[in-house]
Amino acid sequence: MMNPLRVVIITTVVAFFVIISNAQPLPPARPDGFVYTNVGRVDPNPVAIEAFLDPVCPDSRDSWAPLKLAMSHYGSRVSLLVHLLPLPYHDNAYVASRSLHIANLLNSSSTFPLLEQFFKYQDKFYNDQTKNLSKAFIVKEVIDFATLAVGNSLQPQFQAAFSDIRTDLKTRMSFEFSTSRGIYGAPGFIVNGFVLPGVGSPIDYNGWRKIIDPLVAMKRM
C-alpha cells in the first residue's frame, strides 16, 4: 500500500522521467516486458494481463503466487506480460530490475526463475539490511545472487553487462513505460488494456477468478 510520503517520492521521480523522456524521442527497439509462457494450446485472442512488479517489493512478491495459479487454471485462455517497476523507496529495486533485464538478455529461460529467487530471498536486499553497504558491494552481491539462476558460467558476461549503458537504458525505459500506462505503484495490473483499481495491493486467486471468469465467459458468446 502507498502512504503519502511514497506518493510524493513517486511523483518527483515521475516528473524526472518525463523530462528525460521528452529528450528521448526514439521508441525502444522492442516492446517492454517479459512474456510468461503458459502451457497449452495457443489461443489467438486470450485475455491479456500485464503485471507491473518490483522484485524487492513485498506486495509484488505476495501477488505473484496467486497470479501464477490463475495462469495455470486458465491456460492458453490468458496471456501474461510482466513489466518491471523499480520503486524509488526500495533502495535496491533498480539494481535488481537491471539484473533481470540482463538475465533475459543472456538466458531468457532464467528470467522468471530469477524473479522468483528475488521474491524468495527478498529480505537480503531490503533497505535496512543494505543501508551500510556501498553501491559497488550491492551490485556484486546481486551479480553473485543472479548467476545462481542464470548459470555460473555466465558470470563474466553478467558483470560486464552492468557496465553496459544499454542495460541501464532498458531498466529506465521500463520505469518510463510503466508510468506512461498510468501505473505508479507495485503491484499494478492491466487487463485487456484496462488499469485495475487498487494499484499497490496484491490480488488473491479468488480475486483473479472474479476478474477473469466473466471475460472468458463473454468470449464464448
Image (tube, rainbow, N blue to C red):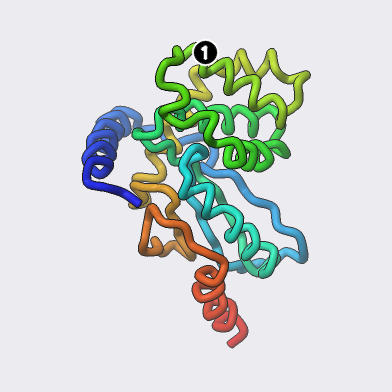
Seen at 53% across and 47% down, the residue is 61
Query: At which x and y percent is residue 115?
Result: 61, 40
- Work out whether 189 lies above or below 213: above
Query: At which x and y percent is residue 127?
Result: 42, 29
Q: Nearer the viewer, residue 75 or 68?
A: 68
Provide the secondary structure element on which disc 1 rests: helix
Quarter of the view holding residue 145: top right
Q: Which residue is mark 1?
A: 137
- Work out whether 215 lies above or below 180: below
Q: Nearer the viewer, residue 20 or 86?
A: 86
- For disc 1, the neighbor class at 10 Å (few under 14, some 14 to 19, many from 20) is few
Query: At which x and y percent is residue 90?
Result: 40, 33
- The C terminus lies in quadrant: bottom right
- Work out whether 169 lies above or below 192: above
Query: At which x and y percent is residue 211?
Result: 50, 73
Residue ranking furthest to the bottom? 221
Q: Amino acid at mark 1?
A: Phe
Seen at 51% across and 55% down, the residue is 50
